[in-house]
Image (cartoon, helix red, strand yellow):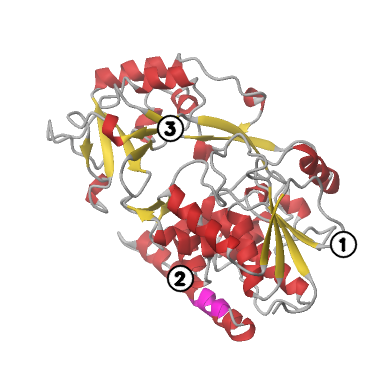
Amino acid sequence: MPKGDKKVIVIGAGLAGCEAANLIAKFGVEVDLYEMKPYRRSPAHKTDLFAELVCSNSLRAASVTNAVGLLKEELRRLGSLIMEAADKAEVPAGGALAVDREEFSGFITDSIKNNPLIHVKVEEVDRIPDNAIVVVASGPLTDGKLYDDIMKKTGESDLHFFDAAAPIVSFASIDMTKAFFQSRYGKGGNDYINCPMNEEEYKAFYNALVNAEKADVHGFDKINVFEGCMPIEVMASRGEDTMRFGPLKPVGLTDPRTGEEPYACLQLRQDDRESTMYNLVGFQTRLKFGEQKRVFGMIPGLENAEYLRYGVMHRNTYLDSPRLLNSDYSMREYPDIFFAGQITGVEGYIESTASGFLAGYYAAMKALGMDAPYNPNEETVIGAMAHYVSDKSITKFVPMNANFGIVAKMPGKFRGKTAKQDKNTAIAERSLSHIDEFSDIIKKNYSL
């Protein structure tokens, strides 16, 4: 039975909204979860499933010696629904965690819809409800009347950056007489398809790319592009060799036809469990669809590629969170209103999930009329992110991925060739000891 007569309203069934709703329900608090799909979809969404992955199918690094890998392990130990889905839907991706999109989102959708304490409302929300505890997880594509209401409550003017998604092609259409399976440095098995280029092929591709016709995206030339999802043509415009130090870097790969490292190399990552779809890693783009087929078709192995999804670009919205939010993701001026997901300025699937977890945790405590029994600190990645987005000393706020730069420094000195690895291992051990304490307190007190 629900604890008390209060409930929490969650707006948006993306990664952050589903994580928040699931955790709130675990505390025995009822949730009204509002989701506009299938009534209306944003320009980036293609399905009616919850927690849809609109860009890559990769959740990035798996190792706990990487900040986002550690954040994933933190969430696992805290009982994250999103991480449970990711682990069930995992597909090969070398040293990264990647998922079958439909299996991943389908698991989350079923879990949410079958939870008796979560009441899904297929409805577009026009404004943040008054006199209610609310988690706003409407996503970076928030628009219309809700966007206007958020801007009114926050006193914000437009605050945007642009994000992009990479194309997906069918495996059957890739010419494997030119491409080959291999992971960089042999890590994780032969999980990637590699399309090698010699110098002549690369330079021809580069020249075609920088001169290709781009789709018109209103306001693009005036607004920031998030570095982590930079369109490949923007990267190319920074210099002829820029891509060879980015998504087309050849290091750690050997072309079996020559026995040597290629001049440049595109990698494609499996996008579904059946290995029928592969996405072009790092090839986010705003080229016109016809231009994508023409220019990317110059890459050996992709001459006759069948595009199951072309690359697209969309506008993202985020708040000036250090001015507006507390470290529990609640608004300073309206403490019953919490924000979660990319709209807070955390960037990335797992970072959005983590913000949803904490926003849901604190919203549930408020609904139960209780003080939070544990507040994760900056020695954990999940806590460090919450402190970063609420740090009043930040005067120029930009979207941020999880990184060890925002985590509390590790005392002691680390020397030798393995110093960085040893330091990151120590950070992970320290973090997970805190997370285990957090998890134990939650389970002991609230029967999660």
**407 and 173: which is toward the camera:** 173
Left or right of residue 291, residue 369 in this image: right
Q: Which residue is mark 1?
A: 131
**Badge 3 element:** loop
User: Which residue is farthest bottom?
Assistant: 444
Chain part drawn in magenta: 433-439
Q: Amino acid at mark 1?
A: Asn
Q: Residues within 10 Å of mark 2 (few under 14, many from 20)?
A: few
User: How far apart, in angstroms, are the residues tagged by discs 2 and 1?
Assistant: 49 Å
User: How far apart, in angstroms, are the residues tagged by discs 3 and 1?
Assistant: 44 Å
The image position of residue 98, as x and y in percent, is 39, 51
Q: Which residue is mark 3?
A: 167
User: Which residue is farthest right?
Assistant: 131
Q: Nearer the viewer, mark 3 or mark 2?
A: 3
Q: How many marks?
A: 3
Disc number at residue 412?
2
Instruction: Identify the residue at horizontal 65%, vertical 73% (top origin).
Output: 375
Q: Quadrant of the C terminus?
A: bottom right
Does the image show residue 330? yes
Instruction: Identify the residue at horizontal 55%, vertical 56% (top origin).
Output: 109
The kind of secondary structure the magenta stretch mainly shows is helix
Q: Residues within 10 Å of mark 1 (few under 14, many from 20)?
A: few
Left or right of residue 253, residue 67 in this image: right
* Quarter location, residue 260: top left
Q: Amino acid at mark 3?
A: Pro
In the rendered image of this protein, does residue 398 appear above or below residue 235? below
